[in-house]
Image: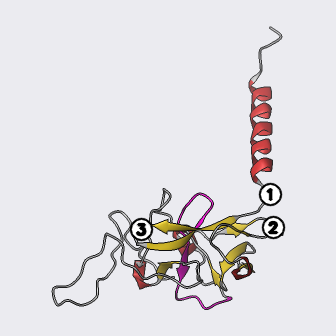
Amino acid sequence: MPNKLTRGSLALVLLALAGVGAASAGSGAVTVKAAANNTLSATIITNSAGLTLYRYMDEKRGSIDCTGACKALWPPLLVAGSAKPVAGAGLVASKLSTIKRPDGGVQVTYNGCALYRYGADKKAGQVKGQGVRGSWFAVTPAGGVTKAVAATSSSTSSGSAPTTTPSAGTTAPPYNY
């Protein structure tokens, strides 16, 4: 039959289609934008899919300390090759830049600080990483962080400031960063 594909030719067709998809998505450009977040009652920055971007407060500006197991839980926002990040609505373009990671990747920075996602944030607007280990906070368009407490927080009976606890299923891993 002339229309019948063999397994080998079908695999080649699928591989070619995957390459086309990668080429169309592979410009390497990353858009970062501002978005209102109802959970934090704050405006924060997100990637183009609306996923919250965080800063690791233990990192100094211009350095990368989140590698290895940390990087697996907190994926860095990367650009491909020599691509430059794009400032979307609500951001100051001059605050957006990149830094070379120890593993050779190129990570997006805002106001000199490396940007990360949280692996447990699966949908736009989620902020499950807010306040994790007292070191991870959502970045604001001004270039700082918001320490606003998410709905998953609790306060002590003594009236002290509320503390943020990760949502169910997002407990901190048993390693040091």
Residue at the front extreme, as displayed:
90
Pinpoint residue 92: horizontal percent, then vertical percent. Answer: 68, 78
The label shown at residue 136 is: none
Q: In this view, does 131 lie above or below 13?
A: below
Name the spot of residue 129 as percent of width and height, x first.
Answer: 44, 71
Q: Give the range drawn in magenta.
A: 46-62
Q: Name the residue under label 1.
A: 27
Residue 68 falls within the magenta-colored stretch: no
Instruction: First in sequence, mark 3 or 1: give its number.
Output: 1
In this figure, which residue is indicated by the disc labeled 2?
83
Distance from disc 3 to disc 2, alpha carbons, whole Å, reads 29 Å
Task: Give the amino acid type for the residue marked by disc 3 in the picture.
Answer: Lys
* 11 left or right, relative to 174: right
How many other residues sit within 10 Å of disc 2, few (<14), some (14-19) or many (≥20)? Answer: some
Question: Which amino acid is tagged 2?
Answer: Ala
Residue placed at 82% from the left, 67% from the top? Answer: 81
Q: Nearer the viewer, residue 163 or 87?
A: 87
Does the magenta-highlighted stretch encompass residue 51?
Answer: yes
Q: Is mark 2 on a helix, strand or loop?
A: loop
Q: Name the one closer to the observer, 95 or 25.
A: 95
**102 to 45, vertically: above or below:** below
Q: Which mark is residue 128?
A: 3
What's the distance in space between the residues labelled 2 and 1, CA to CA?
A: 7 Å
State the SS at label 1: loop
From this view, report whether residue 58 is shown above or below residue 122.
below
Taking depth in this image into account, of 154 and 17 the one nearest to the observer is 154
90 shown above or below 121: below
Q: Name which residue type carries label 1.
A: Ser
